[in-house]
Amino acid sequence: MIAYGRFLFKGEINEGYFDVQNEVIIFDGERIPIKAVRFLPPVKPSKLICVGVNYRDHAEEFGKDVPDEPIIFMKPDTAVIGDGDAIILPNMSERVDYEGELAVVLAKKCKNVSYDDAKDYILGYTCFNDVTARDLQMKDGQWTRGKSFDTFAPLGPYVVSNLDPRNLEIKTYLNGRVVQASNTSNMVFDAFRLLEFVSSIMTLKRGDVIATGTPSGVGPLRDGDVVEVHIEGIGVLRNYAINMK
């Protein structure tokens, strides 16, 4: 599988395309055991645009109507962490939830992209966890505070291009137990429609991320929990939670 990303190996940061083969990656002709590398966030987005209530089952879970157009919000780039990094549970919140998602990564600067041309502007797809301080989200009535804490945007482990984002199995595991299981075909607005919509509002840059929403089954993270987002054709984004109280 050919992927794009950034990884730390022997104290050096490497970036570019590499071949993922079981427990080995091949980069610049060198075979490197995956256990010997640390995957960094695959891109450095200037912004992360996230989508709420974009799976029909998630809308039912929260008693919401399916929206007529995408509901979007943003996370700061300071929230981004990579595979294997810690999600810090902030003192300010009593409930922090996981939300496994497919993320779209932009290949180049764009504005007003049409649905039919969307593929031409997409670098590829990766796993994302829209970590959310649920109590603060509900208290505020808008989502900025509850979505924006440092470490609340795990992204990775790398970006894969040759996929149809409209039909991928997506699962989230909490401490080895499946807590979310769906398919991107259940999205209200698919990845290409989201790019069309978001780019009609704002200019997107290379490396920017559109997180496409989460299926049903969201729930709380606690100190020591391990959360994994598995997406067909991509791989696994694994993080653990730390309570800083």
Image (tube, rainbow, N blue to C red):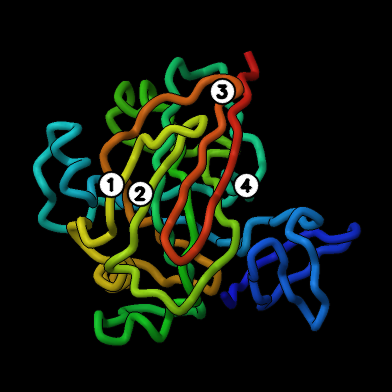
Q: Position of residue 208 (x, y in %)?
A: 50, 65
Image height of 227 relative to 74, above or below: above
**At numbered mark 2, what does the secondary structure look like: helix, strand or loop?**
strand
Image quarter of residue 9 = bottom right
- Camera-side residue of 205 and 216: 216
Q: Is residue 47 left or right of residue 33?
A: left
Q: CB atoms at circles 2 and 1 under 8 Å apart?
A: yes
Q: Quadrant of the C terminus?
A: top right
Residue named by callout 3: 90
Residue named by callout 2: 73
At label 1, the amino acid type is Gly
Q: Nearer the viewer, mark 4 or mark 2?
A: 4
Q: CB atoms at circles 2 and 3 under 8 Å apart?
A: no
Q: Position of residue 131 (x, y in %)?
A: 46, 37
Q: Name the residue furthest right.
A: 10
Q: CA distance from mark 1 to mark 4?
A: 21 Å
Image quarter of residue 5 = bottom right
Question: Which of marks 2 and 4 precedes in the sequence?
Answer: 2
Q: Nearer the viewer, mark 2 or mark 1?
A: 1
Residue named by callout 4: 81
At label 2, the amino acid type is Phe
At label 4, the amino acid type is Ile
Residue at screen point 37% across, 82% down: 119
Q: CA distance from mark 1 to mark 3?
A: 22 Å
Residue at screen point 42% across, 42% down: 172
At label 3, the amino acid type is Pro
Q: Position of residue 62 (x, y in %)?
A: 19, 32
- Camera-side residue of 89 and 1: 1
Question: Which of marks 1 and 2 precedes in the sequence?
Answer: 1
Residue at screen point 49% across, 63% down: 234
Residue named by callout 1: 52
Question: Which of marks 3 and 1 precedes in the sequence?
Answer: 1
